[in-house]
Image (cartoon, rainbow, N blue to C red):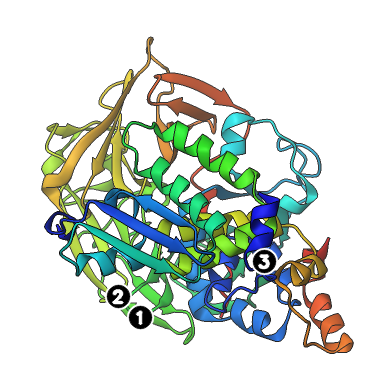
Amino acid sequence: MAAEKSSIKIITLIAADGSVFEVEPNIVKEMKTVQSYIDELDQNTVSIPLPNVFGNDLAMIIEYCKKHASEEETKEAKEEFDFEFVKRMKSDDKLRLLQAASYLNMESFLQFMAKAIAAEIENQSVEFVRDYFQIESDFTPEEEAELRKENEWAFK
Amino acid sequence: MDVQSATYMTPSPVVLSDDLIPEVLSFLSVKSLLRMRCVSKSWRALISDPVFVKLHLKKSSTRKTLFSLMKKRPLSESVDTHQSDGKVYCVLYPKSRLLHNPSFKLSVDSYYLSNENRNIAGSCNGLICLTGFSFTFTYREYWLRIWNPATRTLSPKIGYFRDSSNCPHEMYSFPAFDFKFGYDNSTDTYKVVATNTYLTHNLTCLVRILTFGDNVWRDIESFPVAPQNRIYSGGVYLGGTLNWLAIRDYFPHNVVKFAIPVEQFRIVSLDLGTETYNQYMLPRGFDEMPPDMPTLGVLGDCLCFSYSPNKINFVIWKMQIFGVDESWVQFLKISYQTQHPDFHVVPLFLFEDTLILTSHKRQSIFYNWRNNTVEKINVTITNYTTTDYVESLVSIF
């Protein structure tokens, strides 16, 4: 009901690089961080700076929200969209979008991105995953060898 | 696009914040996670953290893609090899693959040997409780094991108990107790309930319970109404309870021959938290229970009750809200075109549009309830050997 109380018609989102996006209120419903901010306001327009989200990423998030907020789209069309949406992304894009989803507090988009990242690292080697997440191993070679031995079958 | 992105701050390599790592990892398979323990010390700690284990289980449960099957056959190549080597094997079938290609070949990785375990007492949160027994001329001895097939861990034999009830020596080679496994959410513990399968002459039943962790058998109050046919349809686990079908004021030898008024039936439900019983009624859509024994089961997270009112129909009722007698609805009525000489089927699993049933003769049947189509398949799936299963990291205590 909070959305009805608010009289805001147009929301302007300003990304980290200064790019500007005008969106309708139903598009930002998923973005809890933005939504809770505008719920407090009583004015027609509002500009919200999002210093942690880059323009390209914000454009993608808005595209995703538009598709999923649409009542005309079928479930199948949305699934097809999700599939293509992930397909055109590089690994770094996914990681940045996951961070952005967390910052904007978008639960279902966060789960969607987390799942997409998981799909990339499923069945991959330990080295690949370290590289992917920029993690330095803090095990000694002996410790690591011991750990690998514990579940040897999982490395096959 | 490239020129544009070069003009603003180029995003530096992304390093995920610590709270997002579990969100990603919770979508991984157990096998991958066991490998990822080597990534770093913090990852190793995370993957064995009980909070993470629960998060992963929650995601795993929504996938519902697997169930396990155990049978006394080696499964080197295809599912349907009929040689026996006396051992028991477990196979994990992805449900979707089974439905779309019932004759698929199993890869070596998809099964796991478990020796000398005769029965599955149940499966909960990725753990399978196995039971076994040995006998001499004077007693039977039972034991339990907890097995997590995904992490490939098996507990030692626990919960030994002896049963030296007075019976002819030759009878000792048959187990006299039935075991059911469940999870009690209120105390976050796993429990096994043992009931003797042969009623004493005063129709009472011994009920014993064991909590994993303390591993001691305790006798609890007996059933308010003693369940019958427990092997067939008893001890159905649903949300922290075990449920049996029971008949009031009955005489065992009558069951097979005569119809029984439906009012005499009760669902006896044991709450694993409080260790007390509740009783529920069957649906009111019919008066008498025909001679073929009805079945209690769980389909799509609902308690289900099924029976054959005659030789050409098979009816399944669903208790939509557990414990509410008024919430019974008729879920399915399956009719055969012609009278079937051996028409007695047991519904086992519901997966998407498909209901998996098993017949008396161990014929597995896939019934698509939207299209009303029936397909018989060659994989043996029975309620003795098959159980719903989701993989998890839950430790075996």
| Residue corresponding to mark 3 | B10
Q: Which mark is residue B177?
A: none
Camera sees residue A25:
yes
Query: Residue B289: x, y in percent?
Result: 21, 34
Rendered position, B75 above or below A101: above
| Residue corresponding to mark 1 | B187
What is the three-letter code of the residue carrying label 1? Thr
Kindly identify the residue that appears in the image at 50 percent across and 28 percent down.
Answer: B365
Kindly identify the residue that appears in the image at 34 percent across and 38 percent down.
Answer: A70
Kindly identify the residue that appears in the image at 63 percent across and 31 percent down.
Answer: B102
| Residue corresponding to mark 2 | B273
The reply to whether callout 1 and callout 2 are in contact (CB within 8 Å) is: yes
Nearer-N-terminus badge (1/2): 1
Single out the mark in the foreground, 3 or 2.
3
Rendered position, B161 above or below B240: below
Q: Nearer the viewer, residue A37 or B270?
A: A37
Q: Chain of mark 1?
A: B
Q: Chain of mark 2?
A: B
What is the three-letter code of the residue carrying label 2? Gly
Q: Is residue B169 left or right of residue B251?
A: right
Nearer-N-terminus badge (3/1): 3
Q: Residues within 10 Å of mark 3 (few under 14, many from 20)?
A: few
SS of the residue under disc 2:
loop
Disc 3 and disc 1 on one polypeptide chain? yes
Disc 1 and disc 2 on one polypeptide chain? yes
